[in-house]
Amino acid sequence: SQTIHQWPATLVQPVGSPLSLECTVEGTSNPNLYWYRQAAGRGLQLLFYSVGIGQISSEVPQNLSASRPQDRQFILSSKKLLLSDSGFYLCAWGPTGHSGANVLTFGAGSRLTVL
Amino acid sequence: GQNIDQPTEMTATEGAIVQINCTYQTSGFNGLFWYQQHAGEAPTFLSYNVLDGLEEKGRFSSFLSRSKGYSYLLLKELQMKDSASYLCAVVDSNYQLIWGAGTKLIIKP
């Protein structure tokens, strides 16, 4: 069966510090991978998605970046965090290809507080 | 622009029935999802509709009318564990998911 791991679960970082959130998927090959951010009272905001190693699409211009160094590994990074980067970050995977019926499976989430 | 509308919050009584509505305006349509999200946790898949009509899955049912840009999630025999946010999401013509802000459902004993 497929599983998705995301860490760390919680972190508190000072403004201007770097960030690295990691996500790995097991039990599937060539998944589509996603990073979302969820702010209180708002819908999920797609930050990045990837259809393969080294292939990253950015949806929102910001000081965050993503990388996919291995097929089932997806990393969200920042060189210098802003207060506005605080939020709940969710990694998700979906089956390969484009289909309306592709169900996303989410990691447990990472709660980031920037002070 | 693309838009998904859901009520922000609803309250219902344990054992009762509740209907959560979702209306959408998107560029194209390739399906509609409902996800459940407990506080502080990740969303989990509940249902998928792509054709008009009702899909039933145990205590949960989901309805879709594409001509009206409308869906609802029906929860029967409510239990305290159903207290959660319910997210509506539409797959647009580019196979991108457009998410609503979610409906927080509060169940009272």
Image (cartoon, coloured by chain):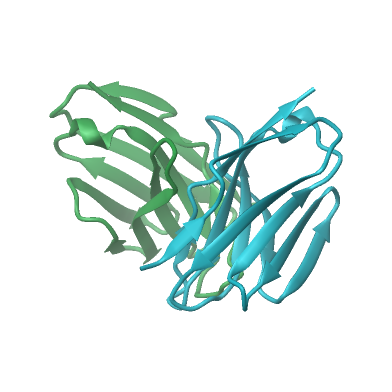
Chain colours: A green, B cyan
Along the horizontal axis of the image, is A59 left or right of A15? Answer: right
Residue A48, given in percent of the width and then of the height, sits at: 33, 56
Residue displayed at 47% across by 63% down? B97
Residue displayed at 35% across by 34% down? A87
Along the horizontal axis of the image, is B75 left or right of B5? Answer: right
Residue A46, given in percent of the width and then of the height, sits at: 37, 54
Number of on-image labels: 0
Residue displayed at 26% across by 56% down? A60
Rendered view: A46 above or below B85: below
Quadrant of the image containing the C terminus of chain B: top right
Along the horizontal axis of the image, is B55 left or right of B34? Answer: right
Q: In front: A59, or B53?
A: B53
Residue displayed at 62% across by 50% down? B35
Residue A95, given in percent of the width and then of the height, sits at: 55, 65
Rendered view: B40 above or below A61: above
Q: In front: A5, or B42?
A: B42
